[in-house]
Each structure stands twice: as C-alpha cells, then as structure tokens.
Image (tube, rainbow, N blue to C red):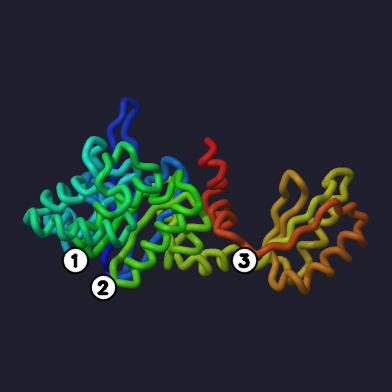
Amino acid sequence: MAMIETHKLAKTFKARKGAVEAVRGVDLQVNEGEIFGFLGPNGAGKTTTMRMLSTLLDPTSGQATICGYDLRRESGHVRDQIGYVGQKGGAEAMETGRENLVLQGRLYGMSKADAQKRAAELITRLDLEPFADRLAKTYSGGQRRRLDIAMGMMHRPRLLILDEPTTGLDPQSRARIWEEVRSLRAEGMTIFLTTHYMDEADGLCDRLAIIDNGQIVGEDTPNGLKQQIAGDIISLGLNMQNGTGAKVKEALHTQAFLRELEETDAGLQLYVDRGEEVLPEVLRLLDHNGAVTRRVTLARPTLEDVFLRLTGRSLREEQTA
C-alpha cells in the first residue's frame, strides 16, 4: 500500500515580482513500512512539499493521498494518521518533557490516564528517564530531538514525517536517532524524512528522491541512484594546456570502456565500467600521448556524486552557502 501518493502536486507563492513556483508537479510514492529520504539543495522545495503533505500548506494544484485519505478533502483524517516533527520541534520550553508528551496526547483526544501511560512508554523507549521531569529548555540538542520524535509518536501514527531529524547533533546522538528510526520501521511504521547527510541517506533510507527547482530529478534506492552515475570514477590530475589535454580527450573518446568524460579544474574525470581493469589502459594511453599525470584516483560513485550530476552542484556547497 502507498502511504504517500502524489500526482503533479504543486505550490505557487505570490511575490512582489510575480509568482514563485516552489513545487512544480511532484509525483511521489512512498510505500508502507519503508524509510523514504528526500534530498535537495536549499530552496528546492523540500520543506514546502513536506508542509503540504502534513496539511500545513494547501497545494495550489495536483492531488495527494496520505494513508489512503485525500489530502484536500480529508485533511482531518490525514492529521490523525501522521506524526510531524519539524526542524525546530514543537516542545514548550517551560514545560517538562513528560508534560509536553501528555499535552501532545491530550491534543490528539487521548484521556489524561492514557496520555500519561503512553508518555511513560515513550520515555522508557527513547531513554528519556534521566531528564523527563526537567524543563525542556534545559535539554541538550540530542535530548531535545528525542523528545521531539517522542511527541511525533505520541498518538501512534502510521506515518512519521521528520524534517532534518539529526541536523546539528553529535555522532552519538545521531546514531541513537538512527537506531530508533530503524526500530520504528521494523515495527511497521513508515518514515518520510529530509536529510542533508549523505551517510544518513545512504545507510538509513530504503529509497530516495532528489528534488531540484521544485521537481523530482531522481528517485531510486541509494545503490540504484549510484548505479545511474554510469560506472566507476577515475579522476586524473593533468596539465590540460599546450594541446596535451585535447589529444588525451580525443584518444579517450575512442575507447569502448569510456561512458562519459568531464573536464575539471584539476584535469579530467572519467566514468567507466570495471574501473580496476581499465585503469592500467588509461595510464598507458596518457603516457603514449605525453601527458604528465600528477594524481590518479579510482572511486565508486557516492550519493554526493549523484547529487552533483543531477542538480549541477554539491550538497556540501549548498550547506555552506
């Protein structure tokens, strides 16, 4: 069963200089019981999409069903089925963690006794006991994030939506969140998350979608996306001046093993099949054409390579910007 299914979902905002198309016809399918990741550069439409799917923004056009309910006509049922954890969380700083959880349960219609019982379960499950009765304003980043996730789980949602769940956390806290997300998936919950961490997307997500300029530009398993890069990557540090670069490129283009070739600031980047086998042939070809090789590296494609190829920029550069 598809827990999220969208068809040409779009959102346009009015601005002084005209309309801004934040999301332009997104088609998504997130299946029951999977961890689905959403990647994209700043301003690509990730958060706008998530806010629409969480009923916090009305779509301009398109359709979506969440947990079997129509996003527009049955928004109340959608909210009953989902838990949403935004980047900034929703805990009241001047309430304790336990009080925040009970309040969340009461907002979802739980009796006081049921809310207290569920809060106690989550406090134990997410190792919140040492600080559950302290004010939330005293929590560390990792403690606060675990409380946020507990609040999102309070009403036992079928779908948990997490916006950047581990941003800013130390490695130990990130690992603890990953462990809990995997545990939830093992219990049958569906997770839809955004992340800027490539290791998180690669190691945690069953499938990924990459969004750029409001449109999905790639979707597959992490390994499937990497395979789309077209083989292994050989990076060559070369002097491309004095005609040598042109000779080398011309010679490489005649080789059957070459799928793609890109010129970089440092020299050339080759996309090839069976990199270990063809590397000696590449080195012989360079030597035959008089190229002085300063550096050679052979690597498997990473999600960062996928992101760069599909969007034209590095996600690390986007984060720095």
Spatial CA span between label 3 and label 1: 37 Å
Image coordinates of residue 16 in percent, x first then y, are 31, 25
Upstream in sequence: badge 2 or badge 1: 2
* Residue 63 horizontal/vertical position (percent): 23, 57
Q: Secondary structure at mark 1?
A: loop
User: Who's the residue at 76% across and 62% down the image?
Assistant: 253
> Which residue, given by chain and number where applicable, does mark 2 sit on?
1
Q: CB atoms at circles 2 and 1 under 8 Å apart?
A: yes
- The residue pinned by badge 3 equals 230
Q: Residues within 10 Å of mark 1 (few under 14, many from 20)?
A: some
Which of these two is toward me, 51 or 146?
A: 146
What type is the residue that disc 3 sits on?
Ala
Which residue position holds label 1? 68
Label 2 Cα crowd, 10 Å radius (few <14 / some 14-19 / many 20+): few
Q: Residue at x 20, y 56 (%)?
A: 119
- CA gap, disc 2 to disc 1? 9 Å
3 vs 1, front mark: 1
In this picture, is 35 found above or below 307?
Answer: below
| Mark pair 2, 3: CA separation | 32 Å
> Residue at point 14% right, 55% down?
116
